[in-house]
Structure formats: C-alpha cells, structure tokens
Image: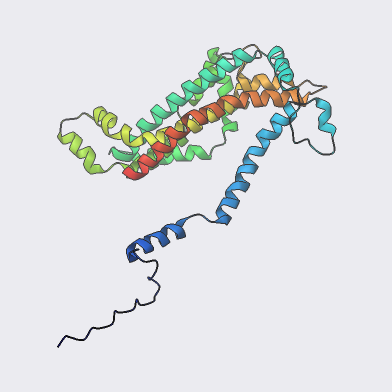
Amino acid sequence: MSAPTLPAAAPTGGEDSGEAGTSVPTRRRARRRTAGRPGFLTYGLLTVFLVVSVYPLCWSFVMGSRSNADFGLSWPPLLPGGRFWENISVVLESIPFWKALGNSVLISSIITLSVVSFSTLAGYAFAKLRFKGRNGLMVFVVATLAVPTQLGIIPLFMLMRQWGWTGEIGAVIVPTLVTAFGVFFMRQYLVDVIPDELIEAARVDGASMFKTFWHVGVPAARPAMAILGLFTFMTAWTDYLWPLLVLNNSNPTLQTALSQLQSAHYVDYSVVLAGAVLATIPLLVLFVAAGKQLIAGIMQGAVKG
C-alpha cells in the first residue's frame, strides 16, 4: 500500500515575496538601491543651481556679441549677436592683452605653487609634529584671518615703494607666497588623515623627518593640495585691487588691463563683457582639464581616510 501524497505547500505572501527565482536578499538590495537614488526634488534643485551659476557667463557672452545699443532694450536678448569677434578685436587693440595674459599666468602659477608647497609643509608640521608653542602659533595664524586685507594695503604699498618694486610683478607675487587659510586648511585635513602609527613606523625604519613628510605626508595630502591649488589659482587670477594699486598700465595683469576699457565719459559695455568672457576662458579650460583628476583625488582621499 503506497503512502499518501501530500499536497505541495503554497507560497506564502509577504513583503519579501516577489518574482519566482529571485532571492530575498537580492530583492532587498534592489529596494535599498532604489531608495538611495536621488529623486525629482534633488534633480530640480541641482538644475536651478546650475542655471543660476551659468546664467551670468551666458549673459556676458550674449551681450558681448552685440552692440552697446542693445543694452537699452526693454527685454534682454537671449541669443548671441554677430559682433563677438569684432568686439574681441577691439579688446586686443585697446589694451596690452597678451602681455597682461602672460603676467596673469605667471603670477597665478607661482603663487599657486608657493602656497600649496608652504601650506602643506606648515600644515603637516602643525598637525603631526610636536614642538613647543605649536598651539599658540596655530591660534596666531588663525587670528590673522580676522584682519581685513584692506587694512594692510597702505603699509604694504609703502614697503613696496621703499624697495623699488612698484610697477613690478614681484610686488604682486611676494606678499601672497603663503596664506593663513592655506596653512589652516592643510592642518585640518592632515590632522586626521595620517595615522600617527604610520609616521612612527617610518621613523623606526630610519626615515628622516623630511623623507617621512615626502613619502607619507605628501601622498596623503594630494586631494587637499589639488583643491587648495585650484582655489588659489582662481583667487590669484581674479585679484584686482592690489595689482591695480601696485602695477602700472604698461605692465598690468589681465583683470587690471580690462579696467582700461572703461573711459571716464563713455563705456562700451559690449566690449567690456567680451573682454570679461575672454578672461574667463583660461579658468574654464583649467576646470575642464583638471576636473577628472580633482574628483579622482578627492575620492581617493575619502577612501583612504
């Protein structure tokens, strides 16, 4: 006599039941990935921020490609005109553009290299070395950030005139070879990203202080160095007040040269905006060229941290 056959158990319904052949952990991971994706609100806010950020540059290009009479229209035009290259030629003829461009590139590059190098050295010392007066010196460096830059312009100009540096690009470079913000930024980054045990291991292996910094500190500091270098270059490139005071019209930077396009009685705003767009192109090229490396460095530092 054969044993009775039991009916097959029906699948129980529940929150983890789904398509046949799909395991419960797989469905849960899929739900977590779906829940972590940005929604419509996130993309909407990012789109608004993008439009607000890009609009000034687009408007400068549109108005820089038109005539000065278009600024009196009741509704600003949305499409560029056909006078952009004509306005650019006026810019090149009116100011020493290429000399100003070379000065800006030289000044910004030297300042960026110096600020990144000295700030990384000082930040590493404040973060990982033990010496007398370390905390007091760090407080003094941070306190200098509270002093407005404009307060030091007059004594600094008197000092540059005493040295005979007025009109020379060295007067723009030397006062900004290192910044308090760069030192503070690198110190705050390195204080947590480098374990003390790694430095002690390097010293046990016989590495000198500078060799430890070069082989341990610099690789860990590369993401912060890239960010600091990018923002330092932007700051030096767009600096206007100090180069305007210490340089003359025959040896200007790009920003001060553009100010020469404005006359006392008549200003051709289309030419001025065309020059502004032309001066912005190097920064855009820098962002495009260094964007992937910058993001890769940031992500690499985040993973290591």
Q: What residue is shown at x 52% (from left), y 16% (from top)?
A: 170
Quadrant of the image occupied by residue 192: top left
- Quarter in which the C terminus is drawn: top left
Q: Position of residue 35 (x, y in %)?
A: 46, 60
Residue 181 appearing in the image: yes
Q: How is the image coloured?
A: rainbow
Q: Nearer the viewer, residue 208 or 280?
A: 280
Q: Position of residue 153 (x, y in %)?
A: 59, 27
Query: In the image, 68: left or right of 223?
Result: right
Query: In the image, 278: left or right of 21?
Result: right
The outermost residue toward the front is: 1
Q: Position of residue 285 (x, y in %)?
A: 54, 26
Q: What residue is shown at x 84% (from left), y 27% (from top)?
A: 69
Residue 305 appearing in the image: no
Asked if residue 246 is positioned above or below residue 61 in the image, the reply reads above
Q: Nearer the viewer, residue 142 or 213?
A: 213
Query: In the image, 247: left or right of 294?
Result: right
Q: Position of residue 106 (x, y in %)?
A: 51, 17
Asked if residue 96 is positioned above or below residue 194 in the image, the reply reads above
Query: In the image, 198: left or right of 27?
Result: left
Quadrant of the image occupied by residue 259: top right
Q: What residue is shown at x 60% (from left), y 43% (from top)?
A: 50
Q: What residue is shown at x 60% (from left), y 22% (from top)?
A: 243
Quadrant of the image occupied by residue 81: top right
